[in-house]
Amino acid sequence: MDARSGSPGPSGSPSPDASAPEAPDAPEEPTASPDPDEADPSDAPDSPPADPPGPGGPQEPTTAPAPPPPAPAEPTPDPTPSPTCTRFLWWCV
């Protein structure tokens, strides 16, 4: 008698391998969860919607945008200073 035939073994209980021939394609059953890239967002209760409605409109991203660079402490010197001023005397007009 074949142990994988599903018939009870010598002890009266089915052998551990009895389920192997009954479901050879168990991972490919239709009840298995679909691939993440093929999953429909409405079918996935764990994943939040792409744009959840907020009380004041769409929610802002959790990361704050980078602040703008600080302004220079000194004004930029005039590219064409007057003849009486040097490049070190940028406040001359």
Image: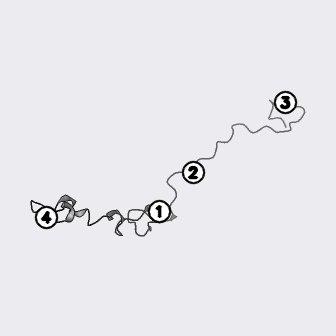
- In depth, the one of 52 and 93 nearer the eye is 52
Instruction: Answer with mark 1 or mark 2, whichever residue precedes in sequence.
Output: 1
State if disc 2 and disc 1 touch (CB < 8 Å). Answer: no
State if disc 1 and disc 3 touch (CB < 8 Å). Answer: no
As drawn, the label of residue 22 is none
Camera-near label (3 vs 2) is 2
Instruction: Answer with mark 3 or mark 2, whichever residue precedes in sequence.
Output: 2
The three-letter amino acid code for the residue at tag 3 is Thr
The three-letter amino acid code for the residue at tag 2 is Pro
Crowding at dot 4, Cα within 10 Å, few <14 / some 14-19 / many 20+, comes out as: few
Say which element carries label 1. helix
Camera-near label (3 vs 1) is 1
Relative to 47, say whether 72 is above or below.
Answer: above
Residue 86 lies, in percent from the top left, at: 84, 30
As drawn, the label of residue 86 is 3
State if disc 4 and disc 3 touch (CB < 8 Å). Answer: no
Which residue is labeled 2 in the image? 65
Residue 61 lies, in percent from the top left, at: 52, 56
Which residue is labeled 4 in the image? 8
Residue 66 lies, in percent from the top left, at: 58, 48
Crowding at dot 1, Cα within 10 Å, few <14 / some 14-19 / many 20+, comes out as: few
Say which element carries label 3. loop
Picture residue at 38% right of the left edge, 62% below the top:
46
Determine the image quadrant of residue 30.
bottom left
**Horizontal relation, residue 64 to residue 29: left or right:** right
Instruction: Answer with mark 4 or mark 2, whichever residue precedes in sequence.
Output: 4
Residue 47 lies, in percent from the top left, at: 41, 62
